[in-house]
Amino acid sequence: MKVLIVGGGGREHAIAMCVKKSEKVEKLYCAPGNAGIAQIAECAPIGAMEFDKLVAFAKEKEIDFVIVGMDDPLVGGLVDKMEEAGIRTFGPRKNAAILEGSKAFSKDLMKKYNIPTAAYENFDSADEALAYLETAKMPIVLKADGLALGKGVLICNTKEEAIEGVKSIMLDKNFGDAGNRMVIEEFMTGREVSVLSFVDGKTIRIMTSAQDHKRAKDGDKGLNTGGMGTFSPSPFYTEEVDEFCKKYIYQATVDAMAAEGRPFKGVIFFGLMLTENGPKVLEYNARFGDPEAQVVLPRMKNDIIEVMEACVDGTLDNIELEFEDNAAVCVVLASDGYPVSYEKGKVISGLEAFEKQDGYYCFHAGTKQTEAGIVTNGGRVLGITAKGDNLKEARANAYKATEWVSFENKYMRNDIGKSIDEVN
């Protein structure tokens, strides 16, 4: 079959790697793709939000199956457009992608169906939000309602910080229209864990766990980013936690969406907080996490196309997911200054080192092919992933592999997965 992946980041590169391995796939396309994806797929210079062009391209190339990797086109309704054109597409329709597209919707859904989450209130005006803060307990969490590239969440330790946060989100519109509405919720403490799942509208299959590092600097300091690295599995995701989540969170979410007339087909990402009162949902995403996909997918044994087709066809109950009994760690190589300001166009060297190394991966996120070679083209440039028999070995391997690649203004955190040492 001919497959088209929509997106151009590290997540889409990881998906493309898996799709390429499927015996069902004869030709792979990606739009817009990046320099790394272009090595295994034919890339088309079409933006992820150019729906009419994407549909026309899919028809022209006689695409059999489309995989939408990014949040914006999912929330915008690309799956609906493709299906209207008669093209089988993996990902939630617009009315289901709202699970990620509106934090207010997802919080209300959890409240209605008794899915464990932090206490919260929704606000449509800055004045109401500011009035609420007068009696609110600190620290507190402010969330822009819409999509904000993973950066629309502010943790405020004082009332003064919270007041400035409300102004930043709702008045200054630092996150654009995502801040037209806002969620204020209680600050939860505990370990964060990410759990990805495949869903076919009624059945859910859980993938292996992972743990992300959002802050830009070592020691979880600095600004929130789209993710500076991750590891899988999480040693904090125990059998006890798994049993609780299966009973009260995972299937409950799928059933809730179906009951609301919004059957979800695709990937649900569960962002969990392991509190002293049990696991609670921090957030939902309606697609693979990035960089979580870069440690989860390399460990998956299944043919990803078979699993995705089962999600589309409603036959996921016939699939059992299998993962390797090992570990993986991903360290993001970023442009210094990310996520605020950074330079692009720096030549990257050393990429060829990964071609002959089994168990090592270099997923391109912000790269571009030029006459001078492959250059940096974003804040997060590469995701360096390595596997190992255990997390400690995978972490050592990943950091060793970061030394193979160089570019001017290369920046990374040096403590990805360091919390592993606390339980080993």
Image (cartoon, grey):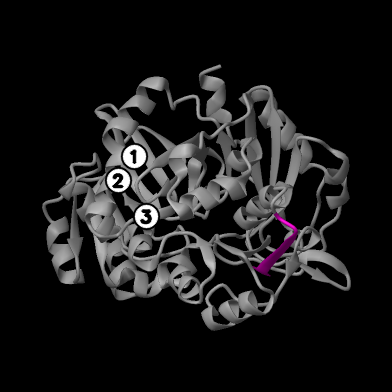
Question: Which corner quadrant holds the C terminus?
Answer: top right
**3D distance between C-alphas at marks 3 and 1:** 12 Å
> Tag 2: Cα neighbours inside 10 Å, few (<14), some, or many (≥20)?
many
Q: Nearer the viewer, residue 84 or 358?
A: 84
Q: Main secondary structure of the magenta part?
A: strand
Kindly identify the residue that appears in the image at 36 percent across and 21 percent down.
240
- Above or below, 275 against 404 in this view is above
List x then y, in percent, for residue 207. Answer: 50, 37
Q: Nearer the viewer, residue 310 or 6?
A: 310
> Tag 3: Cα neighbours inside 10 Å, few (<14), some, or many (≥20)?
many
Q: Nearer the viewer, residue 97 or 24?
A: 24
- Above or below, 211 against 381 in this view is above
Label 3: which secondary element: loop
Q: Are marks 2 and 1 in contact (CB under 8 Å)?
A: yes
**3D distance between C-alphas at marks 2 and 1:** 5 Å
- Judging by the rendered image, the residue that carries numbered circle 3 is 264
Label 2: which secondary element: helix
Mark 2 residue type: Thr
Confirm whether residue 197 shows in the render.
no
- Judging by the rendered image, the residue that carries numbered circle 2 is 253
Image-based side of 198 in relation to 357, left or right? left
Quarter-of-image position of residue 252: top left
Mark 3 residue type: Phe
Sequence-wise, the earlier of marks 3 and 1 is 1
Asked if residue 57 lies in the magenta stretch, the reply is no
List x then y, in percent, for residue 291. Answer: 57, 48
Give the residues drawn in magenta, as a range: 25-33
- Judging by the rendered image, the residue that carries numbered circle 1 is 250
Mark 1 residue type: Tyr
> Tag 1: Cα neighbours inside 10 Å, few (<14), some, or many (≥20)?
many
Confirm whether residue 78 shows in the render.
yes
Kindly identify the residue that appears in the image at 42 percent across and 22 percent down.
238
